[in-house]
Amino acid sequence: MRAATITAIKSFLPDAVLSNQALADLYPNWTADKILEKTGVRERRICAADQTAGDLAEAAAQRLFSTHAVAPDSIDFLMFCTQTPDYILPATACLLHARLGLRQDAGAMDYGLGCSGYVYGLALAKGLIESGQASRVLLLTCDTYSKLIHPLDKSVRTLFGDAATATLLEAQASDAPRIGPFVFGADGTGAKSLIVPAGGFRQPHTADTAREIADESGNIRTDDHLYMDGPSVLNFTLRQIPKAVEQLLALCQSPLDGFDAFIFHQANAFMLERLRRKLAIPEEKFVVHMADCGNTVSSTIPIALEPLMEAAKAQRIMLVGFGVGFSWAATSVTLH
Amino acid sequence: MSAFYEGLAEIFEVEATEITPQFDLIAHNWDSLAIVSTLALIDECFDKLVDGSVLAKCTTVADVERVVGMAAAA
């Protein structure tokens, strides 16, 4: 069969480092050790003021092209997952298409998902490849949440970092699918739990939306900034994700130990550990890869997958993305 | 209740013996991080998911125990 296969992954992190000590200096009663203990994050990378998601994604793609000797004109389709595009319009994917020198008959599109976006992208790429519409798909992810976060909102600033990834998917002859099956889900009743309230057309920026407010925990933000209702997001995750994993196992007709590794969206180490214990996943198979980059939204799963890809060992891996939306998706991928 | 009390002691960074039904949450930094941690602890100890906004209104451990008692299984 013609099977969509992940053949290369490369990530790119911006230069600037935001350390726990720098954050502890801003937040009374917090120490660098406490931030590490509560979040699992030692440092995050932050893009420069004039650096955009398009810039980081281009750098990740160029790194993939040069490392794996991929000719830009061999790409048939570019997908860019971002919630922080360079412009309201046009799609950043069209700009990236030009900057990367793709063929004019190669497709390009943005899609606006966050933490679940990588798994959705794999599903779309598989559809394009296995239906014969494309042979090589370049899936890019990048979010620059640092531009959406108020400097004095520790509830989100301690967690999120900026990053981009590039994944190459190709058609390969195989006896069995290399990606899938998939479980998808969405619950828009949770939209307000993780949101930037102002700046879209529902609530444009005004002087009022730029007014600073302090919450009960002492965090400061405006309606122009990212807001996260942590307990609500945790509730959603603990309620929905174990179900999604059970559904995927049923579709795969496989027990949990049929997988060599598990990569869940790297939200924060605390939430990951709770999910791991709830699902009884062995610690040695459960990948936690966020200490040096934080929660990078749509890029967390490919960042954690990149070292496994480079290990050049046949592995069956479960990927589970979940978060902003609420939105979630899970799948199985076979590497090498 | 002991695993639950031990977990609460860890969240509030106090000795387990200090956790009693009368333990004052507000005096011990009952912020969103403590609420998230308590929500996860309740799920772990009782297999129940409680609403964060309801939890936020609790002022003592006894209040939290009442919320747990009213919650449906996860």
Image: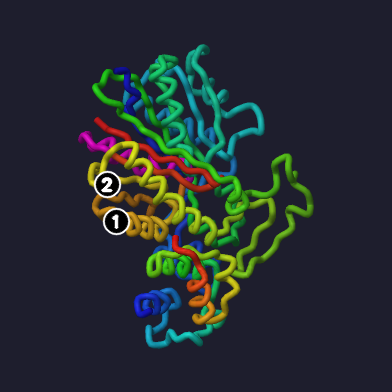
A68, A325: nearer the viewer: A325
Q: Residue at x 31, y 49 (%)?
A: A287
Quadrant containing the N terminus of chain A in the rendered view: top left
First of labels 1, 2 by sequence position: 2
Residue lying at the far top in this picture: please name it.
A105
Residue A37 belongs to the span the image colors magenta: no
Expressed as whole percent of the image width and height from the top left, the position of residue A135 reads: 39, 17
Q: Secondary structure at mark 1?
A: loop
Specify start and end residues of the magenta stretch as a single range: A297-316
What residue sits right under mark 2 in the picture?
Answer: A256
Is residue A166 something that shows in the picture? yes
What type is the residue that disc 1 sits on?
A: Ala
Q: Quadrant of residue A153?
A: bottom right
| Horizontal side, residue A98 vs residue B3: left or right | right
Around disc 1, counting alpha carbons within 10 Å, would you say few (fewer than 14), some (14 to 19), or many (20 or more)? few
Q: Residue furthest left?
A: A313
Residue type at the position of mark 2: Leu
Magenta stretch prevailing secondary structure: helix
Q: Quadrant of residue A306?
A: top left
Label 2 chain ID: A
Q: Which residue is mark 1?
A: A280
Residue B34 against residue A2 in the figure, above or below: below
Marks 1 & 2, CB-CB < 8 Å contact: yes
Q: Is residue A224 left or right of residue A252?
A: right
In the displayed structure, would residue A27 be above or below residue A115?
A: below
Residue A293 visible in the snapshot: no
Q: Looking at the picture, how far across and down is residue A162, in whole percent?
A: 49, 45
